[in-house]
């Protein structure tokens, strides 16, 4: 049983999606709970991947393959999590703001958040403020905004303003990031937090929720 959990953990660290997928199924067949597989293998491994990234051992390519391996395991695990009534840490609506079509950073943040136990609502790219407002009205507890162009950064402020106008700003946390975004800008527009990379986004999201 323990061997399965370790194999899943190692598979995520090494970015081996096939191993993760087969070992998750093997663990389930051996009677390991979905919650244990999620917490002790998938989430734990993604936490270690984030730590490796922070210390400079891993870079974006390694994070991406690890995150994809984690997702392959999560695909097998999800029906069992539903069956066991395992609640996500929180629900995050993520998207690249209006006018911006970049999605690599957004996708990586989404995968890291999913690896940290969050349910992800991916709104895609070029997302209008109203769509973020709708996501909050539909249950998102946090929204994560990405911008890769300085010209689209003001649209982050437009999202915050949209939440205020809808009267729901107080019920949601707003996390922002992207190459040109800074902590000072995040404070200026009234966001709750800024993360300079996907690993920090996952850590910060857990604190904010």
Image (cartoon, rainbow, N blue to C red):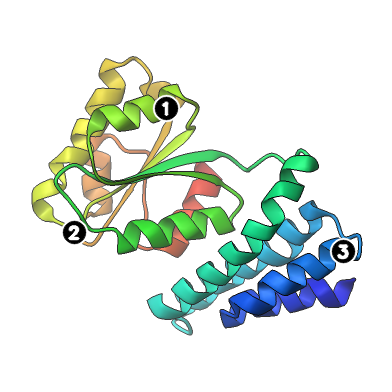
Is residue 98 at all visible to an observer of this figure?
yes
Residue with the mark numbered 2: 180
The residue that appears at 48% across and 51% down in the rendered structure is 204
Q: Which residue is mark 3?
A: 29
Camera-near label (3 vs 2) is 3
Report, in whole angstroms, how far the alpha carbon at label 2 lies from the one at label 1. Answer: 25 Å
Q: Which structural element holds mark 3?
A: helix
Residue beneath disc 1: 136
User: Whole-Å distance between the Cαs marked 1 and 3?
Assistant: 37 Å
The label nearer to you, 1 versus 3, is 3
Q: Front-most of 41 and 185?
A: 41
Q: Residue at x 78, y 41 (%)?
A: 83
How far apart marks 3 and 2 lie (CA) works out to 47 Å
Residue 79 vertical position relative to residue 73 in the rendered view, above or below: above
Horizontal and vertical percent position of residue 19: 68, 78
Q: Is residue 77 left or right of residue 136?
A: right
Q: Residues within 10 Å of mark 1 (few under 14, many from 20)?
A: many
Classify mark 2: helix, strand or loop.
Answer: loop
Q: Earlier in the sequence, mark 3 or mark 2?
A: 3
Q: Quadrant of the N terminus?
A: bottom right
Q: Residues within 10 Å of mark 2 (few under 14, many from 20)?
A: some
List x then y, in percent, for residue 144. 37, 44
* Contact, mark 2 vs mark 1 (Cβ under 8 Å): no
First reached walking from the N terminus: tag 1 or tag 3: 3
Image quarter hosting the C terminus = top right
**Depth-wise, is mark 2 or mark 1 nearer the camera?**
1
Q: Which label is found at residue 174?
A: none
Point 23% across, 58% down: residue: 102
Q: Measuring 44% from the left and 60% from the top, which residue is drawn there?
A: 200
Query: How many numbered marks, from 0 up?
Result: 3
**Is residue 200 rendered to the left or right of residue 85?**
left
**Residue 196 visible, this orientation:** no
């Amino acid at each position: 049983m323990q061997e399965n959990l370790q194999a899943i953990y190692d598979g995520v660290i090494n970015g081996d999606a096939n191993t993760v997928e087969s070992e998750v199924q093997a663990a389930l067949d051996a009677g390991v709970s979905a919650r244990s597989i999620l917490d002790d293998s998938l989430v734990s491994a993604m936490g270690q991947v984030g730590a490796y990234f922070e210390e400079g051992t891993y870079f974006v390519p390694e994070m991406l393959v690890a995150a994809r391996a984690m997702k392959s395991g999560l695909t097998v695990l999800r029906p069992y999590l539903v069956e066991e009534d395992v609640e996500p840490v929180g629900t995050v609506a993520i998207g690249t703001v209006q006018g911006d079509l970049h999605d690599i950073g957004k996708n990586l943040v989404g995968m890291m958040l999913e690896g940290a136990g969050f349910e992800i609502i991916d709104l895609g790219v070029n997302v209008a403020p109203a769509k973020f407002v709708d996501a909050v009205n539909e249950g998102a507890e946090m929204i994560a905004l990405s911008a890769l162009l300085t010209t689209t950064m003001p649209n982050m402020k437009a999202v915050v303003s949209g939440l205020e106008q809808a009267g729901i700003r107080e019920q949601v946390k707003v996390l922002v990031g992207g190459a040109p975004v800074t902590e000072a800008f995040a404070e200026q527009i009234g966001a709750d937090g800024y993360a300079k990379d996907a690993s920090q986004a996952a850590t910060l999201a857990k604190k904010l929720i």
